[in-house]
Amino acid sequence: MVISPLRRKMLRDLVRLWAQVLAIALVLAAGVATMILGNGAFSSLSETRTRYYEANRFADVFANVTRAPQALMGEIEAIDGVLVAEARIVKLGLLDMPGMVEPGSVMLVSLPKVAGAGLNRLHLRQGRIPGPQSTSEVVVSEGFAEVHRLRVGDPLTILVNGQRRTLIITGIALSPEFIYALGPGQMMPDPLRFGIAWLPRASLEAAFDLKGAFSNVVLKLAPGASEDRVIEALDRLTARYGGVGATGRADQVSHAFLDAELKQLSAMVKVLPPIFLLVAAMLVNMTLSRLVTLEREQIGLLKAIGYSSRAIGVHYVEFVVVIAALGIAVGFVAGAWLGAGLAQLYAQVFSFPFLVFTRDPQIYGLAAIVTAISAVAGALYAVRSVVALPPAVAMAPPAPPAYRNRAWSLWHLLALRQTGVMIARHLFRWPFRTFSSTFGVAMSVALLVASLWSFGSINHMIDVTFFRSERHDALVVFGAPEPYRALYAARHMPGVLVAEPFRSATARISHLNRSKRLSIMGKPENPHLSRVLDPSLRPMAMPEVGLIISEALANALDVRRGERVTVEVLEGARPIISLPVSGISLGYVGLGAAMEMTALNRIMGEDALISGVNLQIDEAARGAFYAAAKTTPKTEFLTVTALTIARFKETLAENITVMITVYVILAAIIAIGVVYNFARISLSEQGRELASLRVLGFTRAEVARVLLGELAIVVLLAQPLGWVIGYGIGAAMVAAFSSDLYRVPFVVGYDVYATASLVVCAAALVSALAVWGRINNLDMIEVLKTRE
């Protein structure tokens, strides 16, 4: 095979400039990897969810009622647009696990009479489904079984409606309804203290006195059916049976959290790959501009012997395409490897029966095309001016840079040494290259700032949520609103120091054409254990009239303080009233609305009822309190704040540590690639000057100081620019991540900027050491013989 002269020259250039080629290729590879990683994970989660939902017939509409007769199902099935309707019993029970001091809870869900029928079908992992008439068998969720090391045939003791029952586990399963299984008040899945248990309907009918009745209904809609109209019709039918408003799939907890994760992945794909590709294009332009400048004479000679400008331009573009191909290949491998690791991470958080990281050829093709275009764009900009020169002009060396004494008088005023003047003149002589190098290093700083802020923000979120707002040690939720005597009973439980009641009522709050369904929390006038904070973190007193709503709800409804909202209570007498917005509160979890507890009961036309109690507990008596809580009949759910915080930190720490490690590596790649290329270009440009200094008696350290001084200035100038860009990227990511479920506060401390700068400076130091070795090996005779 005959290799053309230009292609042979390209191969020699690749070998000669292998270090710079590798640096550029790694930056390109980082862009490809993040694109494949983000798009691949997004496609994987989305496709897995779609297939899982279809295979297991995940419902479209969900509704809870207090007690509705089975005869109502005929009317529900007749609603226009309803394809399938299934009545169920869904209740909460308390766990009594051996060796588990703290109380846990379990969601009890009835099974259809025919195994494998109905909606939200189980994906059985082990064992079998209990018989329809069995009263002592149960299927449990896989995550719960794994944490407690439960197997088929093991007993499970549950407190059901105040009665202790021991059931035999016949199966372990997953359900599309509980991909992200959260108990009431939980922020993270905690399979140790919350699980799902599926029992035959007959077993739950007897336990909750629901013979011929149901407490939950799920619907599958016909294609093209209007979800809003179906929900409206369903709410009318269930209102008289204690219905609190149906919700669509978008508001179902598990689906909503998975949607939020997909939203975050989408935001990551939009932010990270463009950063790497932009920096890579600038690196290509820097390197190729210097290469074609040094080869002006060769270009002129090639033109003189008959090579066209197009052929020479193609030669340099091919040089860049080879680098891009190397980066794309490395990016493919890294993206697939990181993607598989990310899939495993998601498998730990979301309960899928399968989760395969999709390797869609379209994603790989898109990544390759975008990367190649960005690299070639940088190359075309670099070669367009040189290849247009006539042969005679190209063969002549470029005119030496003209330095005017007046232009540099500032350096003398600053009393710079001669080496300092040399550094300053060189940086200002090529401002575009200096800026591009500074910008490239700044982007590595920005990438770290845009990721490291999450640690401080999570700590701030925990501090505000659990230590300033929700300051209780335990939260007890009753199965139904209870009279005030339940508060007195709670105060007499072992170890209870302070007991503070609350009232919760499900309502739909509307303003203009916007509405949100949520729980209004009724609190004492000046709550102590469960406070509402204003944006300045000051406690807010509950107003005698009106609502205090969270910033997120205010934004969702486009309402401001002093304006009025329509409150449609979905419980009890279901009143519809207009209330003023008395204040705007701070909140990071969910959509919040609060008012004075007595006023809430008055609106609902009820006596003094409470939905639960916030408790402060004596540390020394926790064991006695937990034992008493397990045997309290009216307790439907109990949350221990310390355990919630521990689980929250544990889950986030694991996920964030993995992601931050990836970001640090990627940022270091950018920093090393930019700094090393800048140093190598500067060394090639100033080789004659540096060798001259050595001949004049300067030491190696003094000569190196000239070149490394430029690097130091570029890196230092990049720090504040990187901080500003990183702050902007982080703010954009927070806005993209925010949802009705949670909002992460954007808190950037000085430690974030310091850590980001230290990591980048360390990467720059590695590049400087590599260049130092080349300066020490500088051949003075050979360089001085070189003709510029």
Image (cartoon, grey):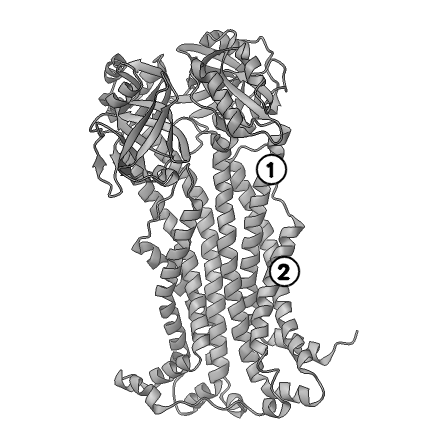
Q: Residues within 10 Å of mark 2 (few under 14, many from 20)?
A: few
Residue 526 left/right relative to 40: left
- Tell me which residue sits at (41%, 11%) in the image: 161
The numbered mark at residue 295 is none
Q: Which residue is mark 1?
A: 48
Q: Would you say residue 523 is visible in this rendering?
A: yes
Mark 2–mark 1 Cα distance, whole angstroms, equals 27 Å
Q: Would you say residue 327 is visible in this rendering?
A: no
Quarter occupied by the N terminus: bottom right
Which quadrant would residue 696 be assigned to in this image?
bottom left
- Tell me which residue sits at (44%, 13%) in the image: 241
Amino acid residing under circle 2: Ile
- Tell me which residue sits at (49%, 31%) in the image: 254
Which quadrant would residue 625 be assigned to in this image?
top left
Residue 264 left/right relative to 333: left
- The answer to whether mark 2 and mark 1 are in CB contact below 8 A is no
Residue 523 on image: x %, y %: 26, 26
Secondary structure under badge 1?
helix
Looking at the image, residue 65 lies above or below residue 712:
above
Which tag, 2 or 1, sits closer to the chain's start?
1
Q: Residues within 10 Å of mark 1 (few under 14, many from 20)?
A: some
Residue 558 on image: x %, y %: 36, 40
Q: Which residue is mark 2?
A: 369
Looking at the image, residue 457 lies above or below residue 109:
below
Residue 700 on image: x %, y %: 41, 82
Looking at the image, residue 638 lies above or below residue 414:
above
Residue 392 on image: x %, y %: 62, 93
Q: Nearer the viewer, residue 633 or 642?
A: 633
Residue 437 left/right relative to 497: right
Secondary structure under badge 2?
helix
